[in-house]
Image (cartoon, helix red, strand yellow):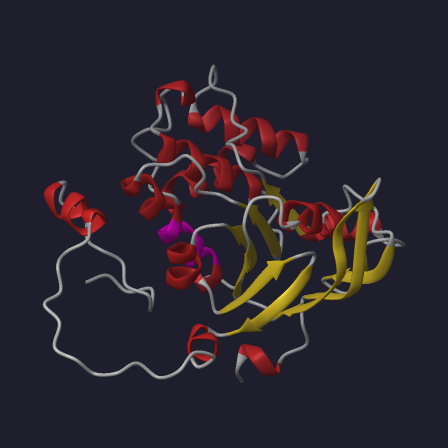
Amino acid sequence: MSIETLAPVIRVRGVEKTYGDLAVLRGVDLDVAPGSIFALLGSNGAGKTTLVKILATLLRADAGSAEVNGHDVGTDAGDVRESISLTGQFAAVDEVLTGRENLVLVARLRHVPEPGAVADRLLGRFDLVDAGGRKAGTYSGGMRRRLDIAMSLIGDPPVVFLDEPTTGLDPQARIEVWRTVRQLAESGTTVLLTTQYLDEAEHLADRIAILHGGRIVQNGTLDELKKLLPPAQVEYVEKQPTLEEVFLALVGEQVPTAAGKES
């Protein structure tokens, strides 16, 4: 069965939010299918983070309704919080602790059985075993972000919100995070990703919604969105490599394709 035919894990209808005279959200509607990566694309100030905060029960909407994993964000906030994990724009790791200690600490705070075993499994899952005994302050940006996401998965939440997860990261670190996001979806986790990077949405998302002026102006798969423009004319053009392709080739990284596979 296609994920598109299943009942949505996230359902938003007519959500509005205003700060003073500024209407940030003006009636947002969207559905997110289970086990999918849904990208919410928009420029700075478009309202992406505001919508995520509403879905995570950190803000109350002024109007409309939203459900996450079958729970209403307004009336069942506790059940929503048990179903989700939220990773913000900057990695929230304790740099004095080792990677493993960060994971064990969160597992204990969440009263998860066998916190040490949980930490070891996550270190393996996110390719951090060799770095597990090092202080998180010595990690690269990509490693810190992977550790941050690993910490957010303790307790196996079915829904993960990633709010601009690659902001400020270098090209190699971005690719590390992209691989991690794909792994989450492959394991059945539903991911709602906010980003202002067009290539990030193109590489990762099963569906893309464009948020502009407080509303979803378009929502569809990458192929559906491309069909909104006239078909391209076939011409012979000598393709020059992009700077990103040159950089990744020189440092030995593979270039990800829009389909999520690496060339």
How many numbered marks does the figure carry? 0
The quarter in which the C terminus is drawn is bottom left
Residue placed at 61% from the left, 59% from the top? Answer: 211
Q: Nearer the viewer, residue 241 or 165?
A: 241
In the rendered structure, the answer to whether residue 57 lies left or right of residue 52 reads right
Residue 30 figure quarter: bottom right
181 inside magenta stretch:
yes
Note whether 34 is above or below 76 in the view shown: below
Relative to 11, say whether 133 is above or below.
above
Q: Does 19 sit left or right of 165 as displayed? A: right
Report the residue at 38% width, 51% height from top.
Answer: 178
Left or right of residue 18, residue 187 in this image:
left
Residue 197 position in % (x across, y down)? 43, 51
User: Does residue 2 appear in this view?
Assistant: yes
Magenta region: 178-184
Camera-side residue: 93 or 175? Answer: 175
Position of the N terminus by quadrant: bottom right
User: Residue 57: x percent and y percent?
Assistant: 78, 46
Q: Position of residue 118 (x, y in %)?
A: 51, 40
Whole-percent x, y for residue 262 in the image: 24, 61
User: What's the residue at 50%, 36% (across, down)?
Assistant: 148
Q: Is residue 153 above or below residue 143?
A: below
What is the chief secondary structure element of the magenta stretch?
Answer: helix
Tell me if residue 118 can be seen.
no
Who's the residue at 70% across and 46% down the image?
Answer: 50
